[in-house]
Image: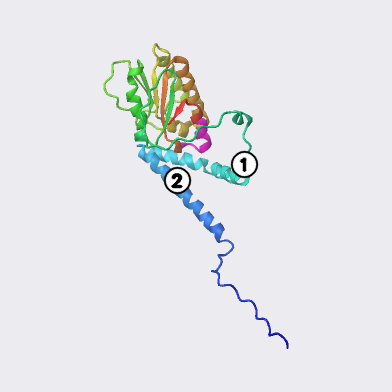
Amino acid sequence: MSSPPRRAQEPSASPEEAPADEEYARTYAAGFEEGLRSALKEVLAHASRGHTNQELRALIQSRLARLAEEVDLKRRSLLSPPRPRPWDALSRPASPPAAPAFRVDSLPAERLGAGASLLVREERPKHALEVLRNNLGRFPRVVLVSLRSPDLGPMPPGRRIDIAVRSPGTASTDHLTPGEVGGRIKDPTEAGGGALVYVDALEFFVMEEGSDLTIRFVHYLVDQVQRTGSALLVSFDPRSLDVKDQSRLERAFVQVV
């Protein structure tokens, strides 16, 4: 007796598989969403710092000008294999475990001594101003490099030195260069007792002069305060730089919070 004819195998009851390009579309959409979210967060961060409409326009235009380069850098980093660590990095001791994240307003007000350099990563000057006010009495003079000098209350003549990066109401092209600011800082830091140097205009220099020149300027400031027994305090929004330049900037300082 012949066996009954075998029935054709029926498809399993598993759910319908997504089309072959669904994963690509989902990944692309997720990246597109993240890009929009990052861009909007960056604009909000700049707006919260009190920038004028003209400054916001210049910041956004500068960011757009670097966009193609950053996208290509990200593409190449995803395609290339991980790079080996350099020998100098391998020879250093392992970094300690990362400290738990704290809110900026919960950080203690650091004491700045001679030769100190502190970078405060914050969207707008807040904790750095607290540190500034709590260290005013440790130096005979304070130098303020800012687009909008902070209110520190009444001070004796000659004790407060304001270096206005850009005069109010003038075009962004009419501003002091990092070299000019460095020249004006030289005398007060080299005077007896040194000076406490406060800077919250690095984002402006990044926008107008580029990241390389701005980071070289920071290295000059750090060297100057260390050589003269002064101190440097910088408030900076890290969103103004890409990750690589952020790392270069932070390495210049003795302390980063």
Could you tell me if residue 173 is visible in this image? no
Determine whether label 2 and label 1 are within 8 Å by CB.
no
Q: Which residue is mark 1?
A: 82
Give coordinates of residue 189: x percent, y percent.
Answer: 42, 16
Q: Find the distance from the CA under tag 2 to the CA under tag 1.
A: 27 Å
Asked if 172 appears above or below 163 in the picture, the reply is below
At mark 2, the secondary structure is: helix
Give coordinates of residue 240: x percent, y percent.
Answer: 45, 37
Kind of residue at badge 2? Ala
Residue farthest front in this picture = 1
Residue farthest top in this picture = 192
Which coloring applies here? rainbow
Q: Which image quadrant for residue 199?
A: top left
Q: Between 105 and 165, which is closer to the camera in this rendering?
A: 105
Q: Between 51 and 36, which is closer to the camera in this rendering?
A: 36
At mark 1, the secondary structure is: loop
Asked if 213 appears above or below 71 in the picture, the reply is above
Number of disc labels = 2
Q: Is residue 193 left or right of residue 244?
A: left
- On whether residue 79 falls in the magenta region, the answer is no
Which residue is pictured at 52% across the width and 34% down the height? 245
Lower position in the chain sequence, tag 2 or tag 1: 2
Q: Is residue 232 left or right of residue 85?
A: left
Stretch in magenta: 240-249
- Crowd tier of the residue under label 1, counting other residues whose Cα lies within 10 Å: few below 14, some 14–19, many 20 or above: few
Query: Which quadrant does the N terminus fall into?
Result: bottom right
Give coordinates of residue 128: x percent, y percent.
Answer: 37, 29
Which residue is pictured at 62% across the width and 35% down the height? 85
Q: Which residue is mark 2?
A: 39
Residue farthest right in this picture = 1
